[in-house]
Amino acid sequence: MGDQNKPKPKTIPKWLNFVIGGTSGMMSTCFVQPADLVKTRMQLMGPAGKKVSTLAVAREVARKEGVRGFYRGLTAALFRQATYTTGRMGCFNSLLEYYKSTYGGTPNFATKICLGMVAGGVGAFAGTPAEVALVRMTADGRLPKEQRRNYTNVFNALGRITREEGITALWRGAGATITRAMVVNAAQLGTYAQAREALLPSMGEGIFLHFCASMISGLVTSAASLPVDIVKTRVQNAAKGTGQVTVLLSIIKNEGVFALWRGFLPTYAKIGPHTVLTFIFMEQLNSLYFKMA
């Protein structure tokens, strides 16, 4: 009888999970956009990139394009977070809460991985047009002036791609994007949830817990996702449609298998802090909701 009268724990409305997830991702992107741009430039270098360091690429951007050059494509990056991250984070948190309420317990690590993959696939499909625009805008500065697309913002990019190449071009590389997203989210969301759960008894709730769990998650995610991320970037930057298997085999044949992890440092420099900031912002926004509810 007492259990029946016991108030149910507060939960965040499903729609708010999506809003909080997207907002957290957009706030984090403002901090990590320079690392993402350097990573993209390195991934597009091909065999010539073997002898080029992260620092050299960053210096080249600063010399030719100035500080503002590091934020080329920021509107596309924010729009990507508003679509992709809103979908994946909201979907994952909603699925996690559904599992807990339905089965009355915390899912094991394998289940968290599966939930992360589902959430990643859903978010990636929604975010592919913004992803295509982002890759092209961040890559533009490395091209000769006469070959640059010179998109002014993400909406200009989306409109021109639709008019010049057809609406299906907005989903170019969707297969590679979804593959990457499933790997990223399985690693990032699943590992974060598991690390948070494992560290909670010794650390207690708080920002330091969120930071440590996020750094573990970011490291695993960077190593797991970089090969599919490189393939996705090459596919989306191509002028004509190219299959991800063809691109993958071409990289291995012409550049060697370790080229699949080219740009690891800027990738981790982006994913690590982005993961940390996203989850910290998300946890703080969740706490704010519970205080105000």
Image: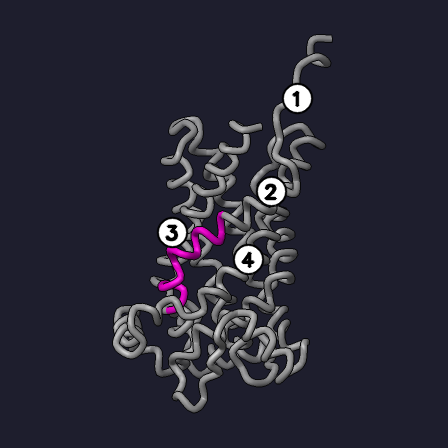
The residues colored magenta run 24-37
The residue beneath circle 4 is 183
If you read the primary sequence from the N terminus, does the residue marked by circle 4 or circle 1 appear first? Answer: 1
Q: Residues within 10 Å of mark 4 (few under 14, many from 20)?
A: many
Amino acid beneath label 1:
Lys
Q: For the residue marked with disc 3, what is the amino acid?
A: Pro
Q: Earlier in the sequence, mark 3 or mark 4?
A: 4
Q: Main secondary structure of the magenta part?
A: helix
Q: Based on the displayed image, in which of its 4 quarters is residue 289 positioned? A: top right
Query: Which numbered tag is attached to residue 8?
Result: 1
Which residue is under mark 3?
273
Please tell me which residue is depicted at 38% across the width and 51% down the height of the picture: 273
In the image, residue 234 above or below residue 106: below
Going 50% across and 60% down the picture, which residue do you hit?
A: 78
Q: Residues within 10 Å of mark 3 (few under 14, many from 20)?
A: some
Using the image as rendered, state which of residue 242 and residue 274 is in the foreground. Answer: 274
Q: How is the image coloured?
A: one colour
Mark 1 burial class by Cα count in 10 Å: few <14, some 14-19, many 20+: few
Kindly tell me whether residue 53 is visible in this rendering.
Answer: no
Instruction: Inspect the magenta stretch and tell me whether residue 28 lies in it.
Output: yes
Q: Amino acid at mark 4?
A: Val
